[in-house]
Amino acid sequence: MDGYRSAVREGLEAAVVVTGSGTLDEDSVKAVRDLTANGPVFRATQTGEIAEVI
């Protein structure tokens, strides 16, 4: 948990959501936006390929 607190305190620069879905769901994006208003959100496939950046 200390690493999480440090990331939040120092600012999150980007986030990756790994999903088998073809899109990012709204709840995933909202969770990232709670931590950073402007950082990019990467959608990665289950194999780790970056499929989308929002």
Image (cartoon, helix red, strand yellow):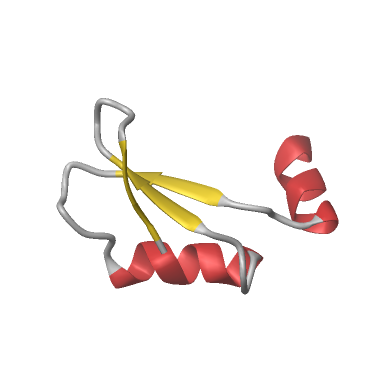
How many numbered marks does the figure carry?
Answer: 0
Q: Between 7 and 23, which is closer to the camera in this rendering?
A: 23
The N terminus is located in which quarter? Answer: top right
Say whether residue 15 is left or right of residue 3: left
Q: Between 26 and 14, which is closer to the camera in this rendering?
A: 14
Say whether residue 8 is left or right of residue 29: right
Snapshot quadrant of residue 19: top left
Instruction: Kindly identify the residue that appears in the image at 36 percent across and 68 percent down.
Output: 27
Check the image and report above or below for 21 versus 37. Answer: above
Say whether residue 28 is left or right of residue 15: left
Residue extending farthest top: 47
Residue 37 spot, x, y in % from top left: 62, 74
Residue 21 spot, x, y in % from top left: 16, 50
Residue 38 spot, x, y in % from top left: 62, 71
Instruction: Kindly identify the residue that appears in the image at 49 percent across and 65 percent down.
Output: 31
The C terminus is located in which quarter? Answer: bottom left
Q: Between 41 and 31, which is closer to the camera in this rendering?
A: 41
Snapshot quadrant of residue 39: bottom right
Q: Between 47 and 9, which is closer to the camera in this rendering?
A: 47
